[in-house]
């Protein structure tokens, strides 16, 4: 059977198929580069697993207090060795990325300390953790103050502003790698390294934490390779490889991770408790698969950028830029465009492909939001998903895809829906 026929059976028309085939052909060199990064990272993870002699006993479920949980303790060594840190905390008790970041911050800050973001405003959910927006239980309620230095035009670091902002109370510097849903660019690991070196030259004992969400395995190095004291992220994003059903990680210096463990469980208990509840196989196997899963998601993002940019839609990052996370923004310019795009992503899903996404008023947003996802793990954004607020400039944020082929189908069907709505001409 001809490959096109398999796509036709899923609803892709010939003009869309042919147009996208041309785009794909032109991307072979970029895809090869992504594969080389994935190969490098696959070997890094394998080396960490072999060094720590992973074996079937590490997949055994524990319950209750989880004392002497070898599988859990060994997984933490595997993460630490992969990220080249002294220690790691990798737990299903960390419920999401925001929780991991909240633990890392609140564990390492004390009343009277100041937290500094030298990269402008942090991810939305962090605003409440920090207390930028008033919130019950925020760091601010505990007497931790916050300061932020805006980025200069071109997403450049304002070194003089940062120097001026660092004072004798500055205890921790938080650096968000991914742009998240902002318009600034995502920082490369090398840029983060330069920023950390500068911060440490001003104040050597300051703790540098990197919010690594969406960035893991996109490059061959991680922020912990360039001086970060802690790197923090979610297991239902990149490092869970699509298999982890929950969880977060904090890798870093022994001193920082110890503080985090006491904060996550309780003072005096620390890393010794926390049963794995039978999740270890999915954590190990997901981490093993993560480099190739991230490669598939990256190919999807670059493919989408090229497909849509060449049709005249603004895309961030653009079709040729180097990548430092897996998020792709496409500005479709109309509510109908955002809705059609999301319908295509939904129609491509392995789960819930038959439902139609609709915009709705979500708490915390000032415009209706449409979301498309048909995921094995609820809310997982390493799985193919798209969302966008129904407001100017009518941009959709697209990410994930456990395999490149699935991401490709999602983009083909998004374009098909736009074509059917008369919003593009091929
Ligand atoms: C997703 C994300 C978070 C928060 O993670 P959740 O799992 O959604 O709580 C924080 N920072 C960045 C940059 C993210 O992408």
Image (cartoon, rainbow, N blue to C red):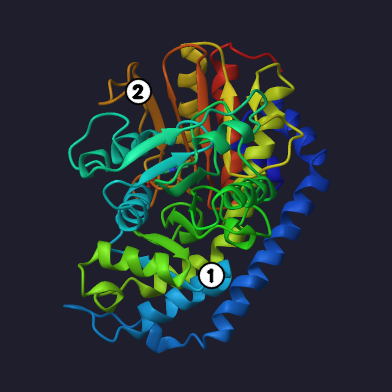
Q: Position of residue 7 (x, y in %)?
A: 62, 39
Where is the C terminus found, in terms of image quarters? top right
Depicted 1 relative to depicted 313: above or below: below
Q: Mark 1 or mark 2: which is in front?
A: 1
Q: Position of residue 375 (x, y in %)?
A: 40, 47
Q: Answer whether residue 308 is visible to the viewer in this image.
A: yes
Marking on residue 228? none
Residue wearing tag 2: 358
Q: Residue 266 is drawn in which quadrant?
A: bottom left
How many numbered dots are placed on residues in this image? 2
Of 297 and 198, which appears nearest the observer?
198
Q: Position of residue 56 (x, y in %)?
A: 42, 87
Figure quadrant, ligand 1: top left
Report whether 126 appears left or right of 425: left
User: In this view, which residue lies farthest toward the front?
Assistant: 168
Residue wearing tag 1: 85
Q: Answer whether residue 274 is visible to the viewer in this image.
A: no
Of 158 and 178, which appears nearest the observer?
158
Q: Residue 36 is drawn in which quadrant?
A: bottom right
Residue at screen point 41% across, 16% down? 390
Report whether 72 appears left or right of 205: left
Badge 1 or badge 2: first in the primary sequence = 1
Q: Position of residue 360 (x, y in %)?
A: 30, 21
Depicted 161 relative to depicted 33: above or below: above
Depicted 338 relative to depicted 253: above or below: above
């Amino acid at each position: 059977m001809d490959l096109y026929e398999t796509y036709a059976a899923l609803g892709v028309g010939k003009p869309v198929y042919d147009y996208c085939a041309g785009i794909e052909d032109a991307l072979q060199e970029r895809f090869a580069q992504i594969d080389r990064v994935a190969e490098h990272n696959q070997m890094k993870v394998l080396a960490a697993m072999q060094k720590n002699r992973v074996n079937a006993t590490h997949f055994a479920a524990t319950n209750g207090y989880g004392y002497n949980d070898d599988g859990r303790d060994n997984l933490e060594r595997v993460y630490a060795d992969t990220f080249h840190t002294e220690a790691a905390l990798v737990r299903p008790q960390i419920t999401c990325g925001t929780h991991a970041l909240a633990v890392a911050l609140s564990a390492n800050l004390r009343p009277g300390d100041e937290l500094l973001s030298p990269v402008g405003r942090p991810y939305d959910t962090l605003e409440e953790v920090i207390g930028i927006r008033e919130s019950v239980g925020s760091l601010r309620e505990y007497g931790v103050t916050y300061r932020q230095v805006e980025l200069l035009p071109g997403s450049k670091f304002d070194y003089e502003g940062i120097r001026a902002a660092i004072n004798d109370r500055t205890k921790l510097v938080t650096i968000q790698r991914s742009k998240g849903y902002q318009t600034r660019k995502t920082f490369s690991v090398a840029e983060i390294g330069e920023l950390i070196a500068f911060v440490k030259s001003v104040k050597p004992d300051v703790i540098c934490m990197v919010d690594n969400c969406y960035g893991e395995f996109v490059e061959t190095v991680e922020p912990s390779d360039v001086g970060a004291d802690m790197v923090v992220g979610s297991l239902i994003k990149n490092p869970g490889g699509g298999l982890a059903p929950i969880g977060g990680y904090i890798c870093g210096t022994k001193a920082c991770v110890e503080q985090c463990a006491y904060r996550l469980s309780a003072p005096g208990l620390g890393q010794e408790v926390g049963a794995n509840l039978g999740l270890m196989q999915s954590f190990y196997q997901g981490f093993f698969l993560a480099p190739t899963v991230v490669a598939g998601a990256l190919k999807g993002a670059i493919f989408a950028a090229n497909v849509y940019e060449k049709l005249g839609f603004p895309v961030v990052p653009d079709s040729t830029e180097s990548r430092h996370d897996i998020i792709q923004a496409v500005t479709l310019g109309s509510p109908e465009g955002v809705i059609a795009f999301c319908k295509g992503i939904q129609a491509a899903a392995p789960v819930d492909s038959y439902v139609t996404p609709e915009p709705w008023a979500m708490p915390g947003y000032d415009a209706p939001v449409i979301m498309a996802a048909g995921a094995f793990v609820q809310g997982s954004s390493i799985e193919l998903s798209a969302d966008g607020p129904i407001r100017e400039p009518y941009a959709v944020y697209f990410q994930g895809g456990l395999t490149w082929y699935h991401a490709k189908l999602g983009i083909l069907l998004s374009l098909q829906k736009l074509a059917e709505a008369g919003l593009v001409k091929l």
